[in-house]
Every structure is written in C-alpha cells, then in structure tokens.
Image (spheres, helix red, strand yellow):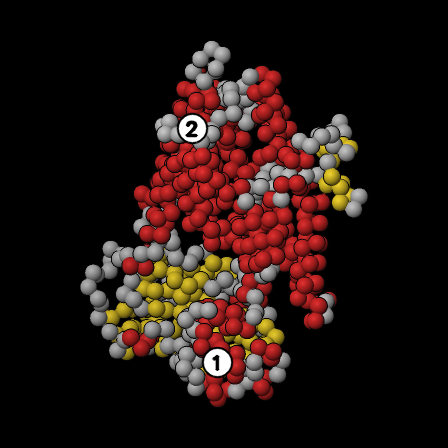
C-alpha cells in the first residue's frame, strides 16, 4: 500500500464497503465509483474527511473529489478493495496497434530493467575476462559467471510472465507458471528434435514444412524454442487474462480458489502451444525464405532488410528461421553470409544509447544508459532495447535505420563468418578464415560496425529530443527572468466566450474547490498553451491537460463536462506529457460538433490548481480578449 492507505480504507468504508463497489475508475481529480446502492454511502462523513475535497453525484457515478494526486489514492483504494487496476481503469490511450504493442512491451519490461542491466553487465564482463585469458571457458569461474549472466535471459519468459500478468490483470503467479511452462526443457524444439525422428511431417515439400515431434490430445504441436523469447509469453498471458475474467463469471464462488487458475492455465497454455508455436515458426520460415530470394536478386537489398529488421525479428522471436540457414551454410560452405548483415544492429543500438547519454539531462535515463552501453559493446543489447530505445520509439527506429545501412554495406561487401563466434566485439575473430588466415571479412566487419555506430550516433544527436527529462520542468525559457516574477499572465487557451466559474454546473469548479479561474464556452475546437512551461499531465482520455508554467503556476484546462466518458473519442492531442511548450503553441484539437451531438457540454474551466500559494488570481479575461488570468505573488 502507498502513502494514502488510511484514506483509501476510510473511503471504501464510507461508500458502503468493498462489496458495495461495482466498479471504480478515475479522471484527473476524482474517484468515480459505480455503487450497488448509493444510499449506503455516507456523503457527510466523506465531505468532511481529511484528504477529500467534496462528494458529487453525476452521470450515474458517485464521485469523490480528491485533487491532482488522485492516481495515487486510486491505486491504494484499488489495492485495499481488491480491485485489479489494469482491468478496471477506464481511461485508455487511443493508439495505433504498433504504438500500443511497443508501450505494452515496454511497460512489461519496466519492473525488471535494473536486474536485466545487471545481468547484461555480468555477461559482458565474463566475455571480457575470457578474452583477456583470466580464466578458461571450462573453468568453474566461467560457469559461475555465465550462470548469473545467462539465467535472466534464458528464463526471461518467467519474469515476463509475472510482469505481463500484473499488466493485464491476471493473477501474477498464474503468469509466472505460464512463463515457466514455456521454459520447460521437454517442450523446446531443440530438445524434441534431438531425441529422434519426428512423428510425422506437416506440409511436406512446401515452404511451411514442419516436423511434428509431439501432439496434445491428438492435435499436432509445431514447437519452437521459447527460452529467451518475449512475445509468446505476453500473448499467452493476455489471452489468459481474458480466460480468467470469463471463468470468474462462470465458476461458483466456493470453487474459484483452485478451479479458476487451473482452467486458466490449461486453456491458455493449450491454445498457446497449439497456436503460438506454428504462427511463429511459419512466420520465421517465410521471412527467411523471402530474404534468400531477395539475396539472389540483390545481396545489398537483402543485407539492408536483415540489418534493418533484425531487432524487430528478435523481439517477436521470428529470427529463428535464419539459424538453420546459418548453421547449414557454415557446415556445407565453411561460412555464412546470409544472416551476417545483422551484425551492425548491436553497434547501432550501442551508439544510439551513447548519444542519448550525451544529450539527456534525465538522471534516471543516464543511469540506465551507462551500463546498457557497456553491455551493448559486448553484444548484450536487451537492456538498451527494452529499457531505453524501444519505449521512446524514435531512438529504436534510428538504430534500425543505422543497422540497415550497415547491413546494406555488409551485403555489398559480402561479409562472412567462418565459425560460430561470440557476440559484439567478440564476434570479430569469427570473421577470420581459419583455412587461409584471410582477414578480408574482418576488415569488412570492422568498417560496417563503425558505419553503424556513426550513423546511429549522428542521427540520434540530430533527432532525439529529451522531452521526458526529469529536470525539464525546471528549464527556463530565454524570455523568462531568472528571478521570480511578481505576476504571471495566463493567456487565453481557447477562443470563445469567457464566463465566470459559477456558470459551470460542477461544484468542483464552480465552488473553486479545484482552484480559482474562469471558464470558456469555445467556438473553435482548438486548445493552445496559455504559458511557457511543461505539460505535466495529459490525461489518457485527452479531455484534460495540466501545465506547469516556468514560474511554477499550475494550470488545469478541462475541456467540457463529463467528457471523460468519451474515452478520448473526438479528442486529438498534438503534444505529449513531459513536452515543453510555449505560449500559443497548439496542444489539442477536438470535434465540437460530435462532442455536442454526444450530449456533452463544452464549457471549459481553466483553473489555477495551486491558487493557495498565490496572493491573488485576477480575472483579467473578463476585460481583455488576449489575457485570461493574472496570478499575483
């Protein structure tokens, strides 16, 4: 529980207890309950409770007004009442599938970033110590170091099963078991294929030819190696969360304790092994075959495709289709040149992280960048990808571009690897032809690695913006004095008719509970920044924006009444939370006609949420068409 544990328990008690709560969501300032019986809630006690601003009833909801710290209170209420935050929260971000998937993966990795970075560092150090000859790869020390470094990456699905479960509202230990099942040795393709001939082969003679080594209830299972994989466990946990939800509705209360997790595991893993394995196998084979065909036409283009998409393929576990080609080429020809254009990806990713380290002022990000860059040099890029570049999207795309350019060069120069080498800088020796000691490929590899790093570094320095730096809020615009101002002018954020807050049919605003200010009845569907400052809050449903001015004034712009119910529909933000903005910069577009058709008022309160810290708030907007408020210190 967090710092609001006592407040959370008191709120639950006086809304009629946890059994009286049907659902709970929150908007920017208030907890929004749906209660079985509102008469069981004690309005007077809640209104006078320390930490509660007031109580309101609107849109079929029992609303407890808390203030700007409502997310923290909401989390504690959910924990105390046994409500799963991930499945009950109403506010959803409206994103395309790609963005949503990246954000989901990044969120799932967030809890294990520190230990992942530590493991990557240990793997890198072990590789360095082996290269220096401090001990041999068969020594107990090497085995010990490998065990620590490899454990997390080999059993990554177990970790991700736990964090995915928490993300999707699945019982965490059910997710953990799903991850463990995916890592079970007997289910791995490498184990099954090493145990003898397949039972039979599906789609023989076609691109989708698949040996079947096991079946479940007579259903053929096309297996893959799930250890170190990412997407399969996330997909299965997501499906399991849906199963759990339905099973909770179907199974009687007295039997839920063991039947719900039992059937959830059975159904989710059965479907996972039968569906996920074949999809991943077919997709990876299709991609590998496609690259082979492209290479016959243009080695340079094939190299660019392998280099550019290699990191994406690894994330989805689709790179395995190249491994048989790689092994077969080395066994039959003595070298591989099909998969090798991937080699620049490690160095591109590392260079991007180094550039971010130089540019960022965010202390937390810098703390991640240093070990991620070190482990990246030794070929361990997971901390860089999942902890740094992928969540921020643009740096990840830059690393893919840099890797594609290096891959094109590798394809053109015919980079070869003669033995199965190490990772990162320790892969260079594998590019020396052991039969002739010819080092041409080694030179190609070094030039390509430098090219990948240069392109990645330069593009990141040019295009990466440190929007989410923790100290951005303290940055001063050149036009703002270093000394505290005597007053702050709050410009008009919307074009329209200015009204006193008393005209707003919401007591939280009309009674100045959330702060002093004015309201605007807009006649244009556009919100602009009223100050120079930072977007400190962009609510996921986009109907409300919080801005902290350079002078410290905190402004809330709440477009419409109860528009949180629209869940972001008809709202189109053009900025992100954490972004620095200037006066007059466009923040948000909204469809006035459609919102009004949906039955919502567009009257927009603009309030100073930290009004109590100032001597006075003057309603200058009633007299001026350019200024809305003047904050006096």
Furthest residue in direction left, as rendered: 483
At x 42%, y 28%, the residue is: 136
Residue 432 pos. (x, y %): 45, 18
Disc with the residue nearer the chain's start (2 vs 1):
1
Looking at the figure, which quarter contains the C terminus? Answer: bottom left
Residue nearest the viewer, comparing 193 with 244: 193
Left or right of 93? Residue 500 is: left
Residue at numbered disc 1: 10
User: Where 56 sits versus 258, above or below?
Assistant: below
Residue at numbered disc 2: 136
Left or right of 189? Residue 550 is: left
Furthest residue in direction top, as rendered: 436
Residue nearest the viewer, comparing 173 with 511: 173
Closer mark to the observer between disc 2 and disc 1: 2
At x 48%, y 15%, the residue is: 434
At x 27%, y 65%, the residue is: 551
């Amino acid at each position: 529980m967090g710092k609001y544990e006592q407040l959370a328990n008191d709120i639950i008690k006086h809304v009629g207890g946890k059994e009286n709560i049907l659902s709970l969501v929150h908007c920017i300032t208030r907890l929004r309950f749906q209660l079985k019986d509102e008469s069981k809630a004690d309005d007077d006690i809640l209104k006078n409770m320390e930490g509660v601003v007031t109580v309101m009833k609107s849109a079929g909801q029992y609303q407890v007004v808390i203030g700007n710290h409502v997310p923290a209170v909401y989390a504690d209420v959910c924990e105390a009442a046994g409500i799963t935050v991930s499945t009950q929260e109403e506010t959803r971000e409206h994103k395309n599938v790609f963005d949503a998937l990246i954000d989901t993966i990044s969120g799932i990795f967030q809890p294990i970033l520190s230990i992942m970075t530590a493991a990557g560092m240990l793997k890198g150090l072990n590789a360095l110590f082996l290269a220096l000859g401090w001990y041999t790869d068969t020594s107990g020390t090497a085995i010990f170091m490998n065990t620590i470094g490899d454990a997390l990456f080999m059993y990554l699905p177990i970790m991700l099963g736990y964090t995915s479960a928490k993300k999707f509202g699945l019982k965490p230990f059910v997710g953990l078991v799903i991850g463990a099942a995916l890592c079970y040795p007997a289910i791995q393709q490498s184990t099954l294929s090493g145990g003898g001939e397949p039972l039979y082969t599906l789609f023989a003679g076609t691109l989708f030819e698949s040996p079947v080594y096991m079946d479940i209830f007579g259903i053929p299972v096309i297996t893959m190696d799930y250890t170190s994989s990412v997407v399969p466990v996330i997909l299965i946990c997501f499906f399991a969360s849906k199963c759990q939800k339905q099973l909770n509705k179907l199974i009687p209360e007295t039997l839920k304790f063991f039947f719900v997790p039992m059937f959830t595991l059975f159904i989710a893993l059965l479907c996972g092994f039968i569906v996920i394995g074949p999809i991943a196998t077919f997709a990876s084979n299709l991609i590998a075959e496609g690259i082979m065909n492209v290479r016959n036409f243009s080695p340079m283009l094939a190299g660019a495709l392998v280099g550019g998409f290699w990191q994406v393929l690894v994330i989805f576990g689709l790179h395995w289709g190249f491994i048989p080609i790689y092994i077969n080429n080395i066994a039959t020809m003595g070298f591989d040149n099909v998969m090798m254009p991937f080699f620049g990806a490690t160095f591109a990713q590392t260079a991007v992280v180094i550039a971010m380290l130089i540019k960022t002022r965010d202390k937390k990000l810098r703390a991640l960048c240093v070990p991620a860059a070190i482990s990246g040099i030794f070929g361990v890029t997971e901390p860089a990808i999942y902890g740094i570049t992928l969540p921020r999207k643009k740096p990840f795309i830059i690393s893919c571009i840099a890797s594609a350019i290096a891959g094109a060069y590798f394809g053109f120069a015919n980079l070869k690897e003669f033995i199965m080498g190490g990772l990162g800088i320790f892969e260079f020796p594998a590019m020396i032809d052991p039969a002739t000691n010819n080092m041409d490929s080694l030179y190609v590899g070094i030039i390509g690695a430098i090219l990948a790093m240069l392109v990645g570094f330069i593009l990141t320095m040019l295009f990466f913006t440190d929007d989410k730096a923790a100290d951005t809020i303290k940055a001063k615009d050149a036009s703002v004095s270093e000394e505290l101002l005597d007053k702050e002018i709050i410009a008009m954020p919307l074009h329209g008719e200015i009204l006193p807050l008393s005209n707003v049919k919401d007591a939280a605003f009309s009674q100045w509970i959330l702060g002093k200010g004015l309201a605007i009845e807009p006649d244009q569907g556009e919100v602009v920044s009223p100050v120079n400052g930072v977007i400190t809050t962009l609510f996921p449903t986009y109907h409300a924006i919080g801005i902290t001015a350079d002078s410290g004034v905190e402004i809330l712009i709440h477009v419409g009444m109860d528009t949180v119910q629209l869940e972001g529909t008809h709202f189109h933000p053009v900025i992100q939370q954490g972004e620095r903005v200037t006066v007059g910069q466009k923040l948000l577009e909204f469809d006035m006609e459609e919102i009004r058709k949906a039955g919502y008022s567009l009257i927009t309160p603009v309030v100073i949420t930290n009004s109590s810290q100032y001597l006075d708030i003057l309603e200058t907007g009633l007299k001026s068409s350019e200024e809305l408020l003047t904050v006096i210190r």
